[in-house]
Image (spheres, rainbow, N blue to C red):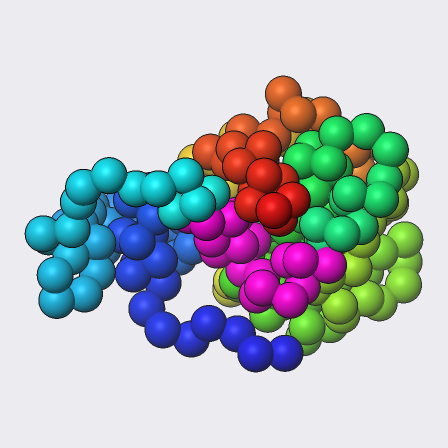
Amino acid sequence: MARYSDAACRLCRREKLKLFLKGDRCYTDKCGFERRSYAPGQHGQRRGGKISDYGIQLREKQKAKRIYGILEKQFRRYYVKADRQKGITGTNLLVLLERRLDNIVYRMGFASSRNQARQLVRHNHFTVNGRKVNIPSFQVRQGDVIAVKEKSWKIPAILEAKETFVRREMPSWLEIDGDNFRGVVKAFPNREELTMPINEQLIVELYSK
């Protein structure tokens, strides 16, 4: 699948918000957003003025896509699935995104960013309920046990991520056993437990047009 391969810091600057796309680097003074928080491009410092309702909705959708590292076609599929489920479409959408295996690996502290988590999953370093799963978009279920394969416990990227995990808030809907490199999905998150700066209603309004 195609992936965005340009500088990640440009995405944060475009959304005028730190999206923590580069892991622990985003917490240091090397963070590109901290040094240049204006929009990227030749006229980035001069951009301003009123944004239309459509523009606001579009930026919210782009922000969500970039946080989770998803391209347009796949993101739309998530929306269609969320819309067909019972409940609030916007909340359903965020829960589906949170249930991605690469996101769970990141949330459990076994990767410093979702992009790194995606790479680690693809390289067969994780199991779900004892079975190897190398599909980043795999949807975890309540009660699933996600674990680092024992042969992968000494991988530097995983060890470094565990050390810096204290910088991030541990989700209450996950149970993490760091000593044994494993975690359990206790439940799906409710809206109050999803702390990303996303206004999902704007995304629903955009796709409902």
Q: What is the x, y in percent for residue 65?
A: 53, 54
Provide residue 3's location: percent of width, then percent of height. Answer: 52, 74
Q: Is residue 98 visible?
A: no
Q: Nearer the viewer, residue 16 or 50?
A: 50
Q: In the rendered image of this protein, does residue 8 appear above or below residue 26?
A: below
The residue positioned 64% from the left and 58% from the top of the image is 75
> Relative to 128, does residue 180 appear above or below in the rendering?
above
Which percent across, then down, holds residue 98? 68, 44
Q: Residue at x 77, y 44 (%)?
A: 82
- The single residue placed furthest to the top in the displayed view is 192
| Residue 189 x, y percent position in the rendering | 72, 30
Dominant secondary-structure state across the stretch colored magenta: helix
Query: Does the segment drawn in magenta span residue 73?
Result: yes
Please indicate whether residue 27 sits to the left or right of residue 81 in the image.
Answer: left
Residue 144 visible (yes or no): yes
Horizontal side of 195 relative to 21 (left or right) equals right
Residue drawn at (76%, 52%) of the image? 80
Magenta stretch? Answer: 58-77
Specify the quadrant that holds the N terminus.
Answer: bottom right
**Residue drawn at the location 41% of the way across and 39% of the way down:** 53
Q: Is residue 76 left or right of residue 138?
A: left
Q: Is residue 194 magenta?
A: no
The answer to whether 84 appears left or right of 69 in the picture is: right
Extreme residue in the front direction: 209
